[in-house]
Image: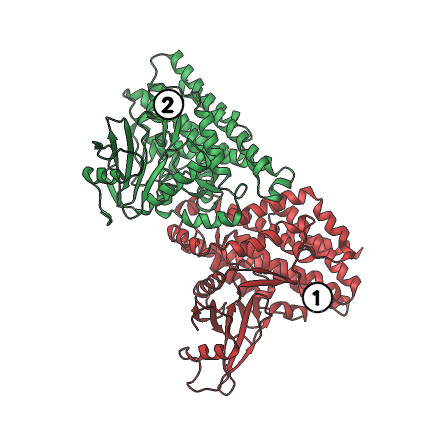
Chain colours: A red, B green
Amino acid sequence: MTTYHPLNEAEAIEIARTLDGIFAPGAELKCREIGDGNLNLVFHISDPAAGSSIIMKQALPYAKVVGESWPLTLDRARIESEALILEGKLAPGLVPNVYLYDKELALTVMEDLSDHIIMRQGLISGGRYPLFADHISTFLAQTLFYTSDLGHNQQEKKLRMAGFINPELCKITEDLIFDHPYTDADTNNFELAIRDEAEALWNDGELHFEVALLREKFLTQSQALLHGDLHTGSIFITPESTKVIDPEFAYFGPIGFDIGAVIANLLLNYAAREGRDSDENEREAFRAYLLETVKDVWTQFHSKFLTLWDAHGVDRLAAAAPGYKANYMQRLLQDTFGYAGCKMVRRIVGLAHVADIDKIEDAAARERAQRLALSIGKDLIKQGRKATSIDQLIDTALSATAAVKV
Amino acid sequence: MTTYHPLNEAEAIEIARTLDGIFAPGAELKCREIGDGNLNLVFHISDPAAGSSIIMKQALPYAKVVGESWPLTLDRARIESEALILEGKLAPGLVPNVYLYDKELALTVMEDLSDHIIMRQGLISGGRYPLFADHISTFLAQTLFYTSDLGHNQQEKKLRMAGFINPELCKITEDLIFDHPYTDADTNNFELAIRDEAEALWNDGELHFEVALLREKFLTQSQALLHGDLHTGSIFITPESTKVIDPEFAYFGPIGFDIGAVIANLLLNYAAREGRDSDENEREAFRAYLLETVKDVWTQFHSKFLTLWDAHGVDRLAAAAPGYKANYMQRLLQDTFGYAGCKMVRRIVGLAHVADIDKIEDAAARERAQRLALSIGKDLIKQGRKATSIDQLIDTALSATAAVKV
């Protein structure tokens, strides 16, 4: 079984039996393949009698997205596994435990999180997660600070960077987030009703300039080890627990990209409330909850990152230079605005969408949600470099919402 | 001879005989070790009868600077050799040809440039190099554009980055250029006469803030493959020819660092004229030549880089976004100011100095030169982020010179 091939369920069970301390010898194991088959096989293996279970994730040597198929390196399984293990050390309890990584099979065996749900689904159903902002801001602050030049030996950081060079998955982001939505690209995917919005994106020079700057940072700024794809579909959640999964896009990039991803996906759900809530009061209450969460994510990240920096900073000059910390944090906020905006825009007109909005049944409500998301996204991109406070981001969402209502 | 050990002259000759097409079989070869023994052995091997010769450079497993000795990776020989070969492809004729690289022995065999002199010595003696600005701006534009995300496949660039991770030599720069001069560090090395200047550097918060930003970029901005140590001691020159050598500090960093290094070393010679020229007219004429060269280096780099970008740019959005090219080039200019300033300051108060100034015999003239270099350096660092034209850099040098005279 050592040469790479996609596993079947019997083989998955065979590997599961070799793990130490998970299943009793001779236990009757059940196995279901539960992946969507686009990028990976995902096996759920359980011993129903003992109530124990694991997840086994195997990378496939290709990607399938909306009918397209292209070859994709199996090395992403190594990157995902190494990123998960590192994140687990830096942010204990906020990622699944990894039990085994098999390089040859591009296979990661990890903790089963079936008692959690995907956060995107939770939010769509109106679920509230009062601990989420605390958990995700801890995850962001711990993983980003301790892999940056501020919190980690600067020579070891360079060596670590070599292990997280991730050209193929970075290219997906470079194309689908930082290029295609701003030109008439074949991969774009939007509804006919908002073709005017798509064309406006293709012809907005001011926006192109800002996106080019954000694209440049994504290509060149090796600030910290990012998760790289931190949307609400990469987060398993319960009211008590938050687990970040799927860091196969991990690479050393700009910190604001990860924070922006979290905030963009909360705001996409905010826009989706157009077609999600049965009455206006309910909608407004849930939107208020979402904006409060957005603000808490930034505010708590800001405070935790600075606390780590004060206590564990490794860069003498960065700590000593007057005004540098405040300037650094403000630039992270500005990047967060810009990347959040880019992530919203691409989910409306680019290749990959979000269920929050796409699954709205009422066409008029769906269109309103799409226009609202684009309006917020474009505003955030254009405001980015001038931003000084997270309140400006909240105000942007509120103003755009008021404009859509009129 | 395959296990690493420092070669003796007989062994060097033995290796030279194995090279194809350099020396005739049975030729009588002479060998002299001509290195300074600080970092490398350098053998000059020649066949005087035929008039042919080569240079053989072997890395030593330690560095000696001003009596200190610390271990240093032999991997720098690989980095130097690979950088030289790549630079030779991108800027033909502007680096020595590489005939052989032996990984095990950390040995690079290359073209002998004994008909050239080290540019620093040439400038000290009042030599003028009318083709230098053209040559070095070509070297800079070609090597920096074609290794950046603007001129090279962006996925291959990432893979190439992994081969130029250079933690030990980057640390030398991070410490000696971007930290120690701004605090009372043991490695600092300055004359008692300018202790007031050193203490002013340690207590200048505005300066620390700007240096912290430049240090951050050096640590995180993977813009292009830099030479990394492009001072006038790394350039062999004649009035007709320019050859860049010694890229052992090569790594992916901010483009302005290389341009700033060239300009800083021209300006250090400019400052050194205090004690170099026999009369005022001669001094003013040579300084005018140096400032003209500084301006030409930037102006020609700017023009050549943009020409390459227009003709061979690989990034759709970077070319299409209105105003982006001009903004990018302005940021390169600003970085050039800042890095030039840092490189001047460290050569006066930091560990490693330049002969241009240190070898001035008259103590008063030497002190004036040191104060002038520091004045220009600090001004450039503080102006950097506001700079819009190379003329401002020239004006800074002229104003500082006028102030020193008064």
Mark 1 and mark 2: Cα distance apart in space: 76 Å
Amino acid found under the numbered disc labelled 2: Thr
Q: Which mark is residue B49?
A: none
User: In this image, A229 relative to B204: left or right?
Assistant: right
Q: Position of residue A243 (x, y in %)?
A: 53, 68
**Residue placed most toward the observer, B92 or A110:** B92
Name the chain under label 1. A
Quarter of the image with the C terminus of chain B is top left
User: In this image, A383 relative to A404: left or right?
Assistant: left
User: In this image, A282 relative to B152: left or right?
Assistant: right
Numbered disc in front, either 1 or 2: 2
Q: Secondary structure at mark 1?
A: helix
| Residue that carries the numbered disc 2 in the rendered image | B238
Amino acid found under the numbered disc labelled 1: Ala
Location of residue A39 by image quarter: bottom right
Q: Position of residue A26 (x, y in %)?
A: 43, 87
Tell me if residue B383 comes above or below residue A286 in the rendering. Answer: above
Q: Secondary structure at mark 2?
A: loop
**Residue placed most toward the observer, A262 or B20:** B20
Q: Position of residue A152 (x, y in %)?
A: 41, 54
How crowded pointer 2 is (Cα within 10 Å; few <14, some 14-19, many 20+) is rated as: some
| Residue that carries the numbered disc 1 in the rendered image | A285
Tell me if residue A203 comes above or below residue A130 in the rendering. Answer: above
